[in-house]
């Protein structure tokens, strides 16, 4: 009688072990998925910040050198590279002192990129300077 009872419990123990393993695996996959999304989000935030601060640096550079630029011209400042948290960001800056749609203002357009090679994230700042 005892041997028959042990044999019927083996199936239950196997079912319990498989069910418990499936539950633990589901929890582990859920936690890994959340962690992966958080890492991806933080990387995107870093790239956005790098692009924005590169654009800001380019605009500040153009403002600093504004008086030395020729009047009534369209000037492209050489690329400003080596910016950002990884040193891969850059800024491309143009200064338009002859813009036709806003004749009362000169315009500095600074485009910041998180990576100069791929240019995957871009932020642009426009600074209007009254004449």
Image (cartoon, helix red, strand yellow):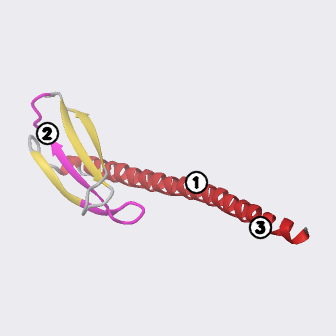
Q: Position of residue 82 (x, y in %)?
A: 32, 65
Closer mark to the observer between disc 1 and disc 2: 1
Q: Which residue is under mark 2?
A: 97
The mark nearer the N terminus, 3 or 1, is 3
Magenta includes 92? Answer: yes
Viewer-nearest of discs 3 and 1:
3
Tell me how far mark 3 sits from mark 2, CA to CA.
85 Å
Q: Are marks 3 and 2 in contact (CB under 8 Å)?
A: no
* Point 73% across, 64% down: residue: 11
Q: Secondary structure at mark 2?
A: loop
- Up-down relation of residue 22 to residue 59 (above or below): below
Crowding around mark 1 (Cα neighbors within 10 Å: few <14, some 14 to 19, many 20+) is few
Extent of the magenta region: 80-101
Image position of 81 (left or right of 28) = left
Residue 79: % across, % down: 21, 59
Residue mark closest to the camera, 3 vs 2: 3
Q: Mark 3: give few (<14), some (14-19) or many (20+) Cα within 10 Å.
A: few
Q: Quadrant of residue 117?
A: bottom left
According to the picture, the residue beneath numbered tag 3 turns out to be 10
Quadrant containing the N terminus is: bottom right
- Residue drawn at x 68%, y 58% as measured from the top left: 19
């Amino acid at each position: 009688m005892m041997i028959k009872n042990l044999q019927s419990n083996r199936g239950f123990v196997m079912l319990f072990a498989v069910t418990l393993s499936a539950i633990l695996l589901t929890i582990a996959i859920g936690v890994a998925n959340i962690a992966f999304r958080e890492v991806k989000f933080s990387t995107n935030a870093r790239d956005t910040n790098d692009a924005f601060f590169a654009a800001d640096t380019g605009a500040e550079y153009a403002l600093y050198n504004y008086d030395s630029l020729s009047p009534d011209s369209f000037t492209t400042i050489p690329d400003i590279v080596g910016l950002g948290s990884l040193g891969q960001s850059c800024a491309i800056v143009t200064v338009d002192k002859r813009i036709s749609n806003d004749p009362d203002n000169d315009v500095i357009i600074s485009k910041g990129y998180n990576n100069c090679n791929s240019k995957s994230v871009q932020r642009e700042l426009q600074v209007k300077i009254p004449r």
